[in-house]
Image: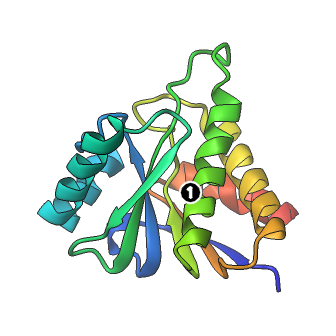
């Protein structure tokens, strides 16, 4: 059975799912945008687990992913992934962004996650072009879901109407 892919306009911290994905920074200590919102809404337990991960491995590299509790959020886990900062496509950003989705789904499968929600990774302060990022997200997630059977539902949670419309167009084509 192929997983269902949906899109939603809204706040990822309010999504009920087994896991939500955080567009984190390499420090894992919270920041601006979705990262700060997840840390604020989820409470101290998320930061505490992020600190333990930092102690073990020194943070999280771009394109990689780690998993923590979701604290007070309506999810079991937060999967933290570090998206690339857009450098006009000269620093392997597209492959690194695809790795964010791939590695997040791999962690989800390892933790028996059935439903996972993704934000629009790297499209805020990291300035990844929204159309390119949406295309990479949809393509990578669709490919990954064909290879694994654990995840049953993926929700792309768009914070703004522009991203929502981009994802809507891409998903209506597939």
Total of numbered circles in the picture? 1
Please indicate whether residue 41 sits to the left or right of residue 131 in the image: left
Please indicate whether residue 35 sits to the left or right of residue 136 in the image: left
Residue shown at 60% from the left, 52% from the top: 103
Please indicate whether residue 50 sits to the left or right of residue 151 in the image: left
Q: Can residue 155 be seen from the camera position used here?
A: no
Q: Foreground: 121 or 103?
A: 103
Residue shown at 56% from the left, 57% from the top: 104
Q: What residue sits right under mark 1 in the picture?
A: 104
Furthest-front residue in view? 56
Furthest-right residue in view? 174
Furthest-left residue in view? 44
Q: Can residue 140 be seen from the camera position used here?
A: yes
| Image x and y of residue 60, in percent | 41, 39
| Image x and y of residue 19, in percent | 45, 72
Whether 100 is drawn above or below 94: the answer is below
Residue shown at 39% from the left, 31% from the top: 125
State which quadrant residue 30 falls in. top left
Furthest-bottom residue in view? 1
Whether 162 is drawn above or below 10: the answer is above
Question: How was the colour assigned to the protein in this rendering?
Answer: rainbow
Quarter of the N terminus within the rendering? bottom right
| Image x and y of residue 21, in percent | 46, 59
Q: Foreground: 58 or 125?
A: 58
State which quadrant residue 133 falls in. top right
Quarter of the C terminus within the rendering? bottom right
Residue shown at 56% from the left, 79% from the top: 112
| Image x and y of residue 102, in percent | 66, 52
State which quadrant residue 99 falls in. top right
Q: Foreground: 110 or 44?
A: 110
């Amino acid at each position: 059975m192929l997983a269902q892919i949906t899109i939603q306009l809204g706040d990822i911290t309010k999504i009920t799912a087994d896991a939500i994905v955080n567009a984190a920074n390499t420090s894992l200590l919270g920041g601006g945008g979705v990262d700060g919102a997840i840390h604020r809404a989820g409470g101290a337990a998320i930061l505490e687990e992020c600190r333990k991960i930092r102690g073990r491995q020194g943070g999280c590299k771009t394109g990689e992913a780690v998993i923590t509790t979701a604290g007070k959020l309506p999810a079991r886990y937060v999967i933290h992934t570090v998206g690339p900062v857009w450098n006009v496509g000269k620093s392997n950003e597209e492959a690194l962004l695809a790795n964010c989705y791939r590695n997040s789904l791999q962690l989800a499968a390892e933790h028996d996650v059935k439903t996972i929600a993704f934000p629009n990774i790297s499209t805020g302060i990291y300035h990844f072009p929204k159309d390119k990022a949406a295309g990479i997200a949809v393509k990578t997630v669709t490919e990954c879901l064909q290879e694994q059977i654990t995840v049953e539902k993926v929700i792309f949670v768009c914070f703004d109407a522009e991203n929502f419309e981009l994802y809507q167009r891409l998903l209506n084509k597939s």
